[in-house]
Amino acid sequence: MMAALAAAGCVVCVKFAPAAIAATGKTDPREVVADEFAGQAITFLLLTAIAATGKIWRFPLATAVAGFLLFRFFDIVKPWPARRSEKLPAGWGVLTDDLWAGVYAGIALVFCLRIGLVEYISGLVRFDVSSLNIFSSAVLGAVQGLTEFLPVSSSGHLVLFETFFGFEPERPEMLLFDLAVHVGTVAAIFIVFRKSIAAFLRNLLVSGKYGTTAFEIYKKSPSVHILALAILATVVTAVLGLLFKGYFASARGNLVVVALMWIVTGTLLLVTDWRKGTRLGLRQFGVWQAVIVGLAQTAAITPGISRSGATICVAILIGLHRRWAVEFSFLLAIPAILGAAAIQLAGDFGKLGSSSLPISCVLTGSIVAAVVGVLALKVLIMASRTAKLKFFAFYCYVLSFFLLVYLLR
């Protein structure tokens, strides 16, 4: 099979790379991926041909990960004679450097198998139902970072992945880990909105120029106005969240609830995309609108309802301009996430650093969530401003459908 894949990649590259070179003006166009496809196949073809060991089959996932990383390394480094082969004419120059990278990666992979390095990697990527490890923490951190800012419910995705990985989402350790990776996404908010946050803080420091009484300052200072409304919305969320804490906790372990709430999220996104003429600025955004957004944020504690999706959609539906809806939503996220993390940490601090929740896993998940969150947040800003939330709605519907089919099978 690997030989067939390598041959197919070679034929496609040699046949079509010249046209790509002519169209792009590049000697090695990124648009041609068949060369890398063939080179990666050579890595595993060489491995199966010369590796007289059963370790390939004992550690298939780790072998695949190591083979991919080694191929990428040699593809970048381009050891002899890969650089020289790039000068070959037409598609052959595009192809042969990747074939050499595949050969080097295959030999290196056999060596890694022989010395036990792949077995070590396998120990990192193996899921353990009793505790987190570096790999599972990184995966969950990436899931959180990607889905916190996309309107598809990060909590729903975390519950789904944790359940399928064998963890118990309702356990205090997992709740604490979930909040830790949520804190990681707060860092992404500060990175992406750093200019808006800096302007917001500067305006707070000079709020006295807007008047002498608290009401005058509230009415005239943009920063004070939005801060007061954010505090009001956060208080609504905090009070109702504590009152219904038992319901929200029980919902975390119920995948049927998660699936149904994804349908709610998708419908809300579709309705919001149909809303036109959102022209309210932050100065026109008042107390009752903040309360409604706070109620939406409370509902989003239920896994499957997106916090960003619910708050942005509700703000747009009551007339707030799309740009300000996004910024207000993520201003609310900072106290909501940090407050929930502080409460959970106060109750379960002793579990942090235990065998079931290592510090290394918490840090790994949080850092990955922050990095991935920056990318996801930029995608959401673009989608919400161009009224393309319906694509996320369809994703929620499809995900809910397959999850319900899985649960009812």
Image (cartoon, rainbow, N blue to C red):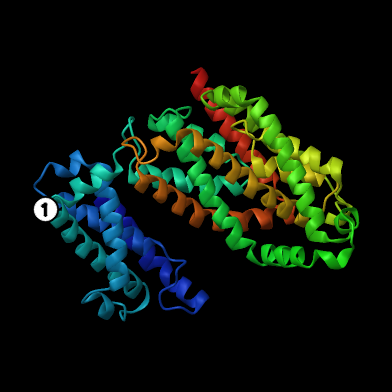
Instruction: Find residue 221 and report its image quarter.
Output: bottom right
Q: Is residue 1 visible?
A: no
Residue 49 lies, with reference to residue 400, above or below; the image says: below
Foreground of the two, 245 or 150: 245
- Residue drawn at (61%, 41%) of the image: 152
Residue of label 1: 115
Does residue 25 appear to the left or right of 234 in the view shown?
left
Q: Position of residue 68 (x, y in %)?
A: 30, 56
Farthest residue to the front: give it: 212
Residue 227 lies, with reference to residue 257, above or below; the image says: below
Q: Position of residue 150 (x, y in %)?
A: 61, 47
Does residue 314 appear to the left or right of 39 in the view shown?
right
Disc 1 packing (10 Å; few <14; some 14–19; many ≥20):
few
- Residue drawn at (50%, 21%) of the image: 407
Q: Position of residue 301 (x, y in %)?
A: 63, 34
Foreground of the two, 25 or 284: 284
- Residue drawn at (54%, 53%) of the image: 373
Q: Is residue 343 visible?
A: yes
Q: How many dots with numbers? A: 1
Residue 222 lies, with reference to residue 310, above or below; the image says: below
Residue 155 lies, with reference to residue 149, above or below; the image says: above
Farthest residue to the left: give it: 52
Does residue 88 appear to the left or right of 322 in the view shown?
left
Q: Position of residue 3 (x, y in %)?
A: 24, 52
